[in-house]
Image (tube, rainbow, N blue to C red):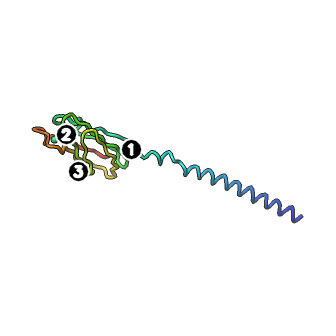
Amino acid sequence: MRKILLVSVVAALVMIMAACGSNNDKSGNANNTPAENTGTAAANEIVIKASNWKFDQEVYTIKKGEATTISFKSDGVHGVEIPDLQVKLTDGKSKDVTVNDAGEYELHCDIPCGTGHSKMIAKIKVE
Ligand SMILES: [Cu+2]
């Protein structure tokens, strides 16, 4: 009689542990979402284009707290610098940034490129 009781208790324990085990497997899978970890490349991109003597937009908008690739293309000898974001690019280059503070950041041409050089100013808007 005692033996039967013991066996059923052990059986019940085994079932409980098995249930716990499968629960752990599920949460383990949930923690293992490597898809998000491998996605380190910036999901967002803006392209800044320069020509004589302007940028193609007055304001470039990027999302706060999200990795963003800033790419630069230039017709003519221009560069782009965004001092507050430590970005300095020449034609064909790009840099990934993540900006956590909303606001406006000045960008300008950083290569003395002629008569219109001082007008080559635009903004990065982070929101
Ligand atoms: Cu310039």
Confirm or deny contact between disc 1 and disc 3 (CB under 8 A).
no
Give the residue furthest to the right: 1
Distance from disc 1 to disc 3, alpha carbons, whole Å, reads 21 Å
Q: Amino acid at mark 3?
A: Pro
Drawn side of residue 39 relative to residue 15, left or right: left
What numbered label is drawn on residue 68? none
Pointer 3 local density, CA inside 10 Å: few below 14, some 14–19, many at least 20: few
Confirm or deny contact between disc 2 and disc 1 (CB under 8 A).
no
Pointer 1 local density, CA inside 10 Å: few below 14, some 14–19, many at least 20: some
Distance from disc 2 to disc 3, alpha carbons, whole Å, reads 16 Å
Q: Position of residue 33 (x, y in %)?
A: 53, 48
Which image quadrant: the N terminus? bottom right
Nearer to us: label 2 or label 1: 2
Q: Earlier in the sequence, mark 2 or mark 3?
A: 2
Name the residue tied to disc 1: 42
Looking at the rendered structure, the secondary structure element under dot 3 is helix
Confirm or deny contact between disc 2 and disc 3 (CB under 8 A).
no
The mark tally for this picture is 3
Nearer to us: label 2 or label 3: 2
Give the residue furthest to the left: 115
Name the residue tied to disc 3: 83
Name the residue tied to disc 2: 78
Q: Amino acid at mark 2?
A: His
The residue lying at 37 percent from left, 49 percent from top is: 65
Front position in the image: 13 or 70: 70
Quick check: is the Cβ at mark 2 less than 8 Å away from ligand 1?
Answer: yes
Pointer 2 local density, CA inside 10 Å: few below 14, some 14–19, many at least 20: many
Q: Position of residue 114 (x, y in %)?
A: 11, 39
Drawn side of residue 107 relative to residue 34, left or right: left
Quadrant housing residue 59: top left
The residue lying at 33 percent from left, 48 percent from top is: 97
Q: Earlier in the sequence, mark 1 or mark 3?
A: 1
